[in-house]
Image (spheres, rainbow, N blue to C red):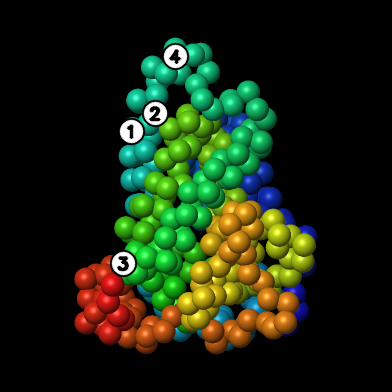
Amino acid sequence: MRAAPVPYVLLMLTVPTALVLWAFERGVDPTVATAVVIFGSIPVVLAAERLWPHERSWNRSHGDLRTDAAYVFLVSPVLGAFLTILLSSIFLGRLDPLRQADGAGLWPHEWPLLLQALMVGVITEFGQYWWHRLCHTRPFLWRFHAVHHSSARLYSLNAFRFHPADAVVGYIFMYAPIFALGANQEAIGIFTVFDFVFGLIQHGNVNVRMGPLNWLFSGPELHYWHHSKVVKNTQHNYGSTFILWDVAFGTRMLPKDRVHDPSDIGFEGMERFPRGLGAQFLSIFRWRRLGLGGD
């Protein structure tokens, strides 16, 4: 398969980031700007999947498109808005006296905005790494996270497929420390856009060969292995955007002696896992009845 030019992939990441930065400088509400840029990036990545597919069969619906669309346009926006309001009300209000007392708060607001966004990324990725790792090593938590792995193909919309409970706790692991530190809302918005667009590419059916960048980013070549049916493979490459915490804790995996088989996606027993949105939400209560094992 023809590989996507790396400069094009970098443009898919940098243009949305630049757009949201431009919007912030013109006083657009960070939440609105972030949401518009994220959803505006979806058709761009979908187009790249048609131009440079990693696996052509993944561009055909596997009976999953309607469910994934519901995650994209219903579940994700509602959860995102709810969690942003919740964490803001909890942490920003409680930390106001502290900020007034020391004049600056705990966050380095004097740093350049992009450097602050990078700091947001490093900290949020640490929380995300450990929550993600727990979901793959604790059977009860796997019941929730299995929703994300319940597709027989990888394409961009898979990035939104999460059980609400998994998404809520994961978001708290990622962003509670950032809100508690009093991070700049614009810095959070910049990294959030980069992280979401990267997630579309990471799960996308785009033939990307990142070379040495696979030591910095948790790109598609690494993420294919994470979505393997083989349990020991899934317990690697937990990073959402960066791979640095996998490197630090010894869970990075990119074999040199073999390539990933496109049919090796999902998990054992997935044929018994429900496909509909509501049934997937309730699957945690029907786990044993579905024959997916006990705890």
Q: CA distance from mark 3 to mark 1?
A: 28 Å
SS class, disc 4 = helix
Q: CA distance from mark 4 to mark 2?
A: 12 Å
- Residue drawn where x is 55% and y is 67% of the image: 236
If you read the primary sequence from the N terminus, does the residue marked by circle 4 or circle 2 appear first?
2
If you read the primary sequence from the N terminus, does the residue marked by circle 3 or circle 1 appear first?
1
Figure quadrant of residue 115? top right
SS class, disc 2 = helix
1 and 2 marks in contact (CB < 8 Å): yes
Q: Amino acid at mark 4?
A: Gln
Mark 3 burial class by Cα count in 10 Å: few <14, some 14-19, many 20+ = some
Q: Residue 92: which numbered mark, if any?
A: 2
If you read the primary sequence from the N terminus, does the residue marked by circle 4 or circle 3 appear first?
4
Q: CA distance from mark 1 to mark 2?
A: 6 Å
- Establish if 230 lies above or below 34: below
| Residue 139, image x, y percentages | 34, 69
Residue on which disc 1 sits: 90
Residue on which disc 3 sits: 140
If you read the primary sequence from the N terminus, does the residue marked by circle 2 or circle 3 appear first?
2
Q: Residue 100: which numbered mark, if any?
A: 4
